[in-house]
Image: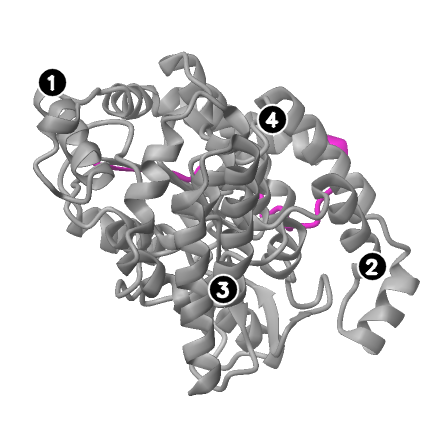
Amino acid sequence: IIARVSIDNRTRALVQALRRSSNRRVCISRVEELTYHLLEFPESRGVAIKEKLIPCLLRLRQANDESLQAAVRETLAIIGYTDPVKGWGIRVLTIDGGGTRGLVALQTLRKLEELTGKPVHQLFDYICGVSTGAILAFMLGLFHIPLDDCEELYRKLGSDVFKQNVIVGTVKMGWSHAFYDSDIWEKMLKEKMGSNLMIETARNSKCPKVAAVSTIVNRGTPLKAFVFRNYNHFPGVKSHYIGGCQYKLWQAIRASSAAPGYFQEYVLGNDLHQDGGLLLNNPSALAVHECKCLWPNVPLQCLVSLGTGRYESEGKTNVTYTSLKAKLTNVINSATDTEEVHTMLDALLPPDTYFRFNPLMNEDIPLDESRKEKLNQLQTDGIRYLERNEEKLRKAAKILTQEKTTLQRLQDWIRLKADMYEGLPFLSKL
């Protein structure tokens, strides 16, 4: 009890110190001090809000100082304050898992960028990925890497990570249940992504909300999805999914891509993470739920869901029993099936809101495929599929680029002013 009281008192003192500070440099250091405190003691966010921290931060954000604005944006994200969406409704992108087959999703995104004339991070308010989809979500949503560079990085990733002598891989499989070297993968992630925390990406005003999904396998059954977020939900808003924003970018990808049999599971704190695809290989329903928590009264404008290719094997056989291997394969296939979620959302969401792109492939390409000719074949199949679905792509692009009405812009402005001036009649302060 004493500890809780002292934390609350510390929170109040930090907010009051910030409100008193007038010097720009002092302001920045006090905002950052408050950020560290709120990250360490998330339960103190409610006290900070009661101390009228949000109006104070919103007024500071008006300052013509990029460093101060960036620091304020991060603190607002930790508190769970969300700015209005870009269009008249929420625009969501989700990307399935599938290893190097993620090249298929890149094809669709390239086409959407061509049709809209905008990069991916400007088109969407929320981007969510699983495993390989999380890598793409981070590349595009957080690092704003152009699609051509993404493809190059992706192919390099395939050749660097998925190279393994079969004998060595088999020995490793027996030893650590992972065919590939998880340490090499971890080292690559640290080099590419640095030591930044998820929430620190909120400092950049151009970054949408981004999430990566993993599966926690040591909290009993049923298995639980875990969401690595670069945002927080407002105190009192309860998401169905556990998660957090205080983890490093590379940790989120390492956890989300720990595919059983390919990489070792990943220990983070007291939790054991495996590939998010074990539970939710198509994260579209999760993304819609998270968005409804972030923007509760805003309709869904567009949900673009990208698969990494599907393969339908030959029809039934005449066998009267199945081998153990076949039984396990059936369990894995049903667990990672992405089309069930698609069927459900297609039935539930309003017309012309939901667009799923998931090409039917000529052959069953494994997620660790790194041969150049196979990856090229993958791309060719993807391009042919997009040519056949050009009308659907054009419709998605058209809906994605629909802007806010003048009335909505006015409502956003009024809400911002009300938030800045503590809900008081603010006209006298303009």
In the picture of the structure, the residue carrying the numbered disc 4 is 145
Residue 240 picture location, percent across and down: 32, 67
Residue 365 visible to an observer of this rendering: yes
In the picture provided, is 353 more to the left or to the right than 250? left
Q: Which residues are magenta?
A: 353-372
Comparing labels 4 and 3, the label whose residue is closer to the camera: 4
Q: What secondary structure characterizes most of the magenta part? A: loop
In the picture provided, is 182 more to the left or to the right than 240? right
Tell me the crowding category of disc 4: few under 14, some 14 to 19, or many 20 or more residues within 10 angstroms, Cα based. Answer: some
Q: Of callouts 4 and 2, which one flags the residue occurring earlier in the amino acid sequence? A: 4
In front of the other: 183 or 327: 183
- For the residues labelled 1 and 3, say whether their Cβ atoms are less than 8 Å apart: no
In the picture of the structure, the residue carrying the numbered disc 3 is 333
In the picture of the structure, the residue carrying the numbered disc 1 is 406
In the picture of the structure, the residue carrying the numbered disc 2 is 183
Judged from the image, the secondary structure of the residue bearing numbered disc 3 is helix
The residues tagged by marks 4 and 3 sit, at their Cα atoms, a distance apart of 32 Å
Comparing labels 1 and 2, the label whose residue is closer to the camera: 1
Q: Amino acid at mark 1?
A: Thr
The residues tagged by marks 1 and 4 sit, at their Cα atoms, a distance apart of 32 Å
Residue 334 visible to an observer of this rendering: no
Comparing labels 1 and 3, the label whose residue is closer to the camera: 1
The residues tagged by marks 2 and 3 sit, at their Cα atoms, a distance apart of 28 Å
Q: Is residue 82 above or below residue 261?
A: above
Name the residue at 46% across, 76% down. Answer: 6
Quarter in which the N terminus is drawn? bottom left
Residue 80 picture location, percent across and down: 35, 52
